[in-house]
Structures are given as structure tokens and as C-alpha cells.
Image: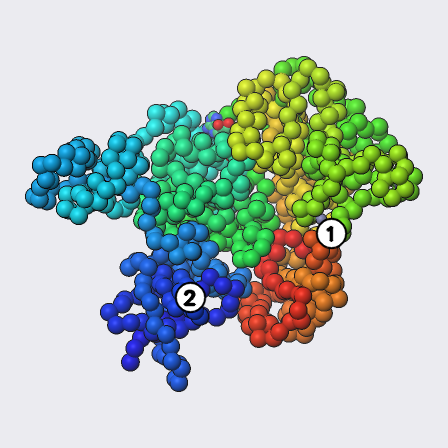
């Protein structure tokens, strides 16, 4: 009887396809194959082999294997199968996410540009008149490691000569693609600072790769030297042949972090993020798959890469919301990293100054080992945070007089200030003071943000934009004015207030061009007086030694949100942005402007003990029966009309009607219409995660069978980050 292979395709289908394995072909799970599919050929991934063929159905045969090795090694394959089940996302799409785009499309898994070639002495000879071939062979023969194609071409040889020598078996392709030249120590290695006593004690509490799986929550206040501990750990414990994974939230925002790793480890560092082109992705993917001893620094999808000898995982800024994918396969890179460490039997270190409540909870449950680092590295002291009540104070560009005075004082001392505004653009809305009209997005239930630099009004929730007008579009009144604060407006006020000091704006608009963030950081790192004004982006892991003052223009945004994660996120952002102050030798000060200076959350912020605040927030989560005390999932629907969306969820609700599971909704989402889609949600909240998981599996299968009315789509989000 012929053997059957069960194959996954890169399609949103919750099913696999059976094919006959032709005689003589050996397949293993994770391997890429070509299969006939409809009238075309498709690339598939083998999920299972040796399945009994179903009776009475004639099956087509696999056309061939794309490689004779599995593109996804065992642990990667297991990780993705687990994730497919956990996040309720079709297995095929999960598995294909771990392939670089070129391989998803069915390209051959070899690094086209940079094959390495080596001379071999096979006894055959080069014809006397083939001077160029002789020269190429000699050239390669002088290089014991061989050379990449690009270097060979650059040296004046061509592909025909390579081919001719290869046919005569005088040269061969080196495998793996590149020899390990990783252990050349870069010169800067010598300059690594010695760990402080506190750092040493923290580092000693971490298990080594040989001790198998364990998870560590490294809680280290901002500027405590966590990055230094990661570097030290890898240097001490990672073997010459070992691979390591370092997850970071957004690589483009923190080029400094990557540079520090490169200083220590040179060519052993490879990066992985969304700005790489297809060729770079394939090349890096192959290195990882070939088991080269890389230290890979990458964003969330790096957790899915096919490491074969992974011995350490580090997740920096583990609380960062960018670890959760917001669409399609909605996985958490951080959570997959922990599961991956478990599969690979290696340690995982989750680092943050403001760890997620999930991780703090896991530490309390002794699932993670808590390692604390509560003093700053070097001579730096933690910043002093104080609240500045701005009720009935006149504001200029959102800034109060005391805040402007404080900036003036530190500039006079030759220091730098950072002003945090939570909105880009000039103002969040344009309003008519005669008729009260506010300009809204025609496609979303939101207002348009006014961008004065390019005289546009833009929606921050879809791509709609329109030219700004001088008059109210409704009543033509001239009393048509920007309301509220954006980074551009604060930048203008600061530029007027401090005409002799550079004011540098950092937000998505000002950093769009490639390399612009690096330019901005370079300017700040000269240490000369300047005022930085920007969004969230400024809160992310930067090390500005001469910033001694941080001003938060308005802290009140998250205080009264309906989203149960809002207080946690508010505190994390405020502490992270505060953490940019006083990282060098001079002490730092933080002024938080608010209209609610008696709000208990802001009061505890000033005491600055994150773990105490986290305890308090965890109590509230427990009382409200929210995650991490409950397992949560959201069904979302997007339709042409709200009625359709709500109806779709109404059909799901009875399926979830089981003891131990609460359902909330269906309700319109907070932004009920976005890009002309009407959005609604149904929340499922369960005591028991296993029970929720099997319920969801059942519901998803059921929904696949049913046909929803045209014009509405459903999706599922497990462990949602946004519940609004
Ligand atoms: P974190 O990652 O916790 O924010 P970093 O590792 O970036 O902290 O360290 C903060 C600053 O302190 C950096 O400028 C770093 O170079 C410096 N630093 C860290 N450890 C030491 C040390 N042991 N001695 C001197 N300076 C240190
Ligand atoms: Zn008007
Ligand atoms: Zn819009």
C-alpha cells in the first residue's frame, strides 16, 4: 500500500491535504514539497507521513521534495504546531510564517548571491589555454576558507569560469554557506565595563545553558545595566558553536542596542526585522537553519526562526506591546520565546524595568525566577518623579510655566531636556468656535489630526488625509482652530521659548526616512544642550546620558480608559519615559503634568516602586476577574454594517455558552467604524485555559463549516492586548 503524506498549504484553511508519496521519495515533517493543486503546482509543508489512505478516494502524488532536509527542524515545527492550536490560527499559515518570503513562494533554499567556493585538488587538470580558469583556481587555492561568489566576480572572474571548474570538479561549493569566522574578537571587546556588585549578583542568579529550561524575570530599573548583563551572560556562557536569540521590540528605534551587541560579538551578530529585503532574509534564515553559531537580534518574528542549536533566549523590554502581532496569526513573540526555550531545553531571560503583569504574576507563582536589580549602573541615581497639577494654570503648547522654567534651568547648566507628548501632529482635532463642528474622518469614527508642517488633516486609524482649510468647512467661520496638543505644536512653543537651543522632534513623521533616527540620536549624543520632544518612541530603551529633565505634557489619557490594560500601560510608559532622565552622572528629574494629581495611581508612580504598583494592579485584575487570573479571547467581526457584525457574533455566543466561561457582548468596538468596516467584539473569559482552548477549537471548526452572510468577516484573538 502506498504511503500518504499530510500536507499544509499557505492558505487560511483549517485543514490539511493528503498526497501519495511516490516510491523512492523519503519525507519528514517540516520538509518543503511541490504538489499538484488544482490546475497549478503549489509549495506545501509536510506535517505527517505514513498516514493510512482514506478508503475510496483517489489521491494525487507529491511531485517532489524541494530539499532533502526539513525547512523546519523538529523544535520549530513543534513550536508552530503548538502556536497554531493555542492561537487558533490555521496550521499552514503558521508554518509558512517561519519561512522567508522567497521560500514561501517556492524558491530554492540556497543563498543565490553569496555561495562560497573552495578549490579542491582532484587530480584533473585545467586545459593549457584556459588561462582565466587557471587564474581563478590559483586565486581560490590561496584562500583556505574559500570565497563568496560576489568576491570572485569582483576580482574579475565570471560565472562561466566558475561553472567550468565546478564541472571538472576542481572547485566545490562550501557548505554551510559561509565558514564560521565568528570568533574573531573585535577590538572593542576589551572595553567592556566590569559588572557592579548588584549586576554580578543578578548575573549569578541566572542559570547557565547547560542547566536546561528555566525562565527568569530580570526586573531591573531603567538604567540598571540589564543590557550589560545580557552581554556578559552571552560572553560567559554561550559556547563557540551555540546559537542565541535576543528579542527586542523595535530594532529601528534602538540602533544603539544592536551596536552594543556588535561591539562585543562582531560578525556573530545577525539582525532580523521587517526592513530587511527578501535576499537578506533568506541569507539570515539559512544561517540560522544551517546551525551557524549566530547571536540573532530581532523583532517578534525572530522567535519563529529555524534555530538548530539554540542555547539561550533573551527577551528585552518584555512588557512591550509590539511583541503581540495585531493581525492574521496573532501570536506573542515573548510567549512563544518562553515555550521555545522549554522545547529547546535552554534558559530564557525576560528583562524589563516595567514587566508585564502576566510576567510578574508568573514570578509570584514561581513559574519564573525573579531576579531584581534595583540600583542604577555606574554612578547614576534613579530619577525623582513629581506631579505638577495644571488645573487652572495657563498652558502654552501644553506646557505650564513651572515646566518651561525647569527646562530653562537645566539648559542653562548645559544639560538636555526631554518632553513627552502622546500624540503626533500639531493638534488632535480642528474645531469651529462658532458652530462647534469638529472635523472627522469620513471612513472612521475618529477625528482628523491636524498636521501643520504639511498643511494636512490625517486620520491616524486609516490612510485618509485631506488638505487643511483656514475656515470651518461647515459654516465658513474663520474661528476654526486647533484644539489640544501634538508634538508639532509643542515643538513650536519650545522653539519660540528657547530660540538659541536646538529642538528635536522624534515621532513617526520625523523619523520616516531611513537612518533619520540615527541622525537624531547622534545629535543628542554630542551631549550639547537641546530639547527633545516626541512620542512613545522616546520611551524605548534609549540611553541619553546628558538628559536630566523629563516633562510629561499630559498623563491623564490612560487614567479613565475602559480598557482593563490601560492603567498598566500608562504606568509602564510613564516609568519608561522617566527612565531616560539622569542616566549619566547627573541626577534626573521628572515633571508629570496632570489634572488629577490626587489620583492614587499617579501618587504611587512618584514613589517609583514598580513591583508595588504591579501588586496593586494585580489585585484589581483579580477582583475584576481579568487576565492573568482569567484566560481571555476575543471574537471580532468586521462587516459592511454594524448590524451584520453584531449578528455574526450573536451566532457565536450560544456556542460559547458553557459553565466556567463568561461571555461579554457582542458590543461595538471602541472605534466602531474603521476604514469603513463596522467592528464588533465578543469577549470570552474563562477560569481554565485548557477548557477555553478546546472550546475555541470547536467553535472555529464549526464556524468554518457554516457560511456567514456576505460582507462580514470574523477573527479570533487569544490573549488580546487591546479589548476596546
Ligand atoms: P538598561 O538596559 O537596564 O536600561 P544599560 O545596560 O543600557 O541599562 O546601562 C545603562 C548605562 O549604564 C549605559 O550607559 C551603560 O553603558 C552603563 N553601564 C552599565 N553597566 C555598567 C557598569 N557595570 N559600569 C559602568 N557603566 C555601566
Ligand atoms: Zn463652523
Ligand atoms: Zn480614518
Q: Quadrant of residue 405?
A: top right
Vertically, is 70 above or below 558? below
What's the residue at 74%, 30% (across, down)? 489
Is label 1 within 8 A of ligand 3 (CB to nearest ligand atom)?
yes
Q: Is residue 294 visible?
A: yes
On the image, the x and y values in percent for residue 482 come to 81, 35
Q: Hey, which residue is sitting farthest front in the picture?
A: 129
On the image, the x and y values in percent for residue 429 come to 78, 40
Closer to us: 672 or 320: 672
Vertically, is 624 above or below 224? below
At numbered mark 1, what does the secondary structure look like: helix, strand or loop? loop
Q: Hey, which residue is sitting farthest bottom in the picture?
A: 56
Is label 2 within 8 A of ligand 3 (CB to nearest ligand atom)?
no
Lateral position of residue 522 relative to residue 461, left or right? left
On the image, the x and y values in percent for residue 212 come to 37, 51
Lateral position of residue 603 relative to residue 166, left or right? right
Q: Which label belongs to residue 444?
A: 1
Amino acid at each position: 500500500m502506498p504511503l500518504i503524506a499530510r500536507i499544509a498549504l499557505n492558505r487560511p484553511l483549517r485543514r490539511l491535504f493528503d498526497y501519495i508519496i511516490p516510491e523512492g521519495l523519503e519525507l519528514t515533517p517540516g520538509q518543503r514539497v511541490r504538489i499538484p493543486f488544482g490546475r497549478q503546482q503549489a509549495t506545501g509543508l509536510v506535517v505527517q507521513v505514513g498516514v493510512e489512505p482514506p478508503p475510496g478516494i483517489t489521491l494525487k502524488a507529491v511531485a517532489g521534495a524541494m530539499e532533502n532536509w526539513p525547512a523546519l527542524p523538529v523544535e520549530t515545527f513543534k513550536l508552530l504546531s503548538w502556536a497554531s492550536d493555542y492561537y487558533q490560527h490555521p496550521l499552514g499559515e503558521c508554518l509558512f510564517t517561519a519561512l522567508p518570503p522567497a521560500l514561501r513562494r517556492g524558491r530554492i533554499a540556497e543563498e543565490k548571491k553569496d555561495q562560497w567556493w573552495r578549490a579542491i585538488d582532484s587530480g584533473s587538470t585545467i586545459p593549457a589555454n584556459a588561462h582565466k580558469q587557471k587564474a581563478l583556481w590559483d586565486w581560490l587555492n590561496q584562500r583556505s576558507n574559500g570565497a563568496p561568489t560576489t568576491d570572485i566576480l569582483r576580482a574579475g572572474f565570471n560565472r562561466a569560469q566558475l561553472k567550468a571548474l565546478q564541472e571538472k570538479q576542481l572547485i566545490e561549493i562550501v557548505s554551510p554557506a559561509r565558514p564560521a569566522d565568528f570568533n574573531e574578537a573585535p577590538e572593542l571587546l576589551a572595553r567592556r565595563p566590569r559588572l557592579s556588585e548588584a549586576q554580578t549578583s543578578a548575573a549569578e542568579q541566572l542559570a547557565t545553558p547547560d542547566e536546561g529550561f528555566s525562565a527568569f524575570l530580570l526586573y531591573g530599573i531603567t538604567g540598571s545595566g540589564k543590557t550589560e548583563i545580557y552581554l556578559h551572560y552571552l560572553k560567559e556562557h554561550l559556547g563557540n558553536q551555540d546559537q542565541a536569540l535576543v528579542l527586542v521590540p523595535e530594532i529601528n528605534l534602538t540602533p544603539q542596542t544592536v551596536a552594543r551587541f556588535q561591539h562585543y560579538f562582531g560578525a556573530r551578530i545577525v539582525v532580523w526585522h521587517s526592513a530587511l529585503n527578501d535576499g537578506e532574509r533568506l541569507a539570515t534564515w539559512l544561517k540560522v537553519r544551517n546551525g551557524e553559531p549566530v547571536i540573532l537580534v530581532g523583532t517578534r518574528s525572530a522567535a519563529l526562526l529555524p534555530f538548530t542549536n539554540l542555547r539561550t533566549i533573551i527577551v528585552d523590554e518584555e512588557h512591550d506591546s509590539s511583541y503581540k502581532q495585531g493581525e492574521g496569526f496573532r501570536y506573542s513573540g515573548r510567549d512563544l520565546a518562553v515555550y521555545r526555550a522549554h522545547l529547546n531545553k535552554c534558559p530564557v531571560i525576560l528583562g524589563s524595568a516595567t514587566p508585564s503583569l502576566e510576567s510578574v504574576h508568573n514570578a509570584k507563582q514561581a513559574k519564573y525566577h525573579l531576579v531584581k536589580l534595583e540600583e542604577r549602573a555606574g554612578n547614576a541615581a534613579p530619577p525623582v518623579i513629581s506631579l505638577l497639577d495644571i488645573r487652572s494654570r495657563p498652558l502654552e503648547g501644553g506646557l505650564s510655566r513651572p515646566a518651561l522654567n525647569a527646562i530653562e534651568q537645566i539648559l542653562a547648566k548645559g544639560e538636555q531636556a526631554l518632553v513627552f507628548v502622546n500624540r503626533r501632529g500639531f493638534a488632535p482635532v480642528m474645531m469651529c468656535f462658532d458652530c462647534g463642528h469638529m472635523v472627522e474622518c469620513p471612513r472612521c469614527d475618529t477625528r482628523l489630526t491636524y498636521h501643520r508642517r504639511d498643511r494636512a488633516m490625517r486620520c491616524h486609524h486609516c490612510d485618509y488625509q485631506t488638505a487643511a482649510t483656514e475656515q470651518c468647512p461647515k459654516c465658513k467661520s474663520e474661528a476654526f482652530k486647533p484644539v489640544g496638543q501634538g508634538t508639532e505644536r509643542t515643538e513650536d512653543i519650545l522653539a519660540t521659548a528657547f530660540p538659541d537651543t536646538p529642538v528635536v522632534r522624534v515621532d513617526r513623521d520625523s523619523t520616516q526616512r531611513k537612518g533619520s533616527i540615527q541622525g537624531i540620536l547622534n545629535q543628542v549624543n554630542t551631549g550639547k544642550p537641546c530639547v527633545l520632544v516626541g512620542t512613545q518612541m522616546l520611551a524605548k530603551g534609549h540611553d541619553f546620558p546628558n538628559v536630566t529633565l523629563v516633562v510629561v505634557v499630559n498623563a491623564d489619557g490612560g487614567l479613565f480608559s475602559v480598557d482593563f490594560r490601560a492603567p498598566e500601560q500608562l504606568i509602564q510608559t510613564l516609568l519608561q519615559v522617566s527612565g531616560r532622565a539622569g542616566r549619566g552622572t547627573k541626577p534626573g528629574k521628572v515633571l508629570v503634568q496632570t489634572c488629577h494629581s490626587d489620583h492614587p495611581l499617579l501618587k504611587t508612580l512618584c514613589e517609583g516602586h514598580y513591583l508595588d504598583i504591579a501588586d496593586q494592579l494585580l489585585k484589581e485584575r483579580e477582583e475584576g476577574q481579568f487576565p492573568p487570573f482569567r484566560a481571555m479571547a476575543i471574537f471580532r467581526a468586521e462587516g459592511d454594517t454594524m448590524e451584520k457584525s453584531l449578528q455574526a457574533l450573536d451566532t457565536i455566543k450560544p456556542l460559547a455558552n458553557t459553565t466556567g466561561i463568561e461571555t461579554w457582548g457582542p458590543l461595538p468596538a471602541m472605534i466602531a467604524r474603521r476604514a469603513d468596516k463596522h467592528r464588533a467584539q465578543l469577549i470570552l473569559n474563562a477560569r481554565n485555559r485548557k477548557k477555553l482552548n478546546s472550546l475555541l477549537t470547536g467553535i472555529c471548526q464549526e464556524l468554518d463549516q457554516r457560511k456567514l452572510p456576505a460582507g462580514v468577516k470574523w477573527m479570533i484573538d487569544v490573549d488580546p492586548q487591546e479589548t476596546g
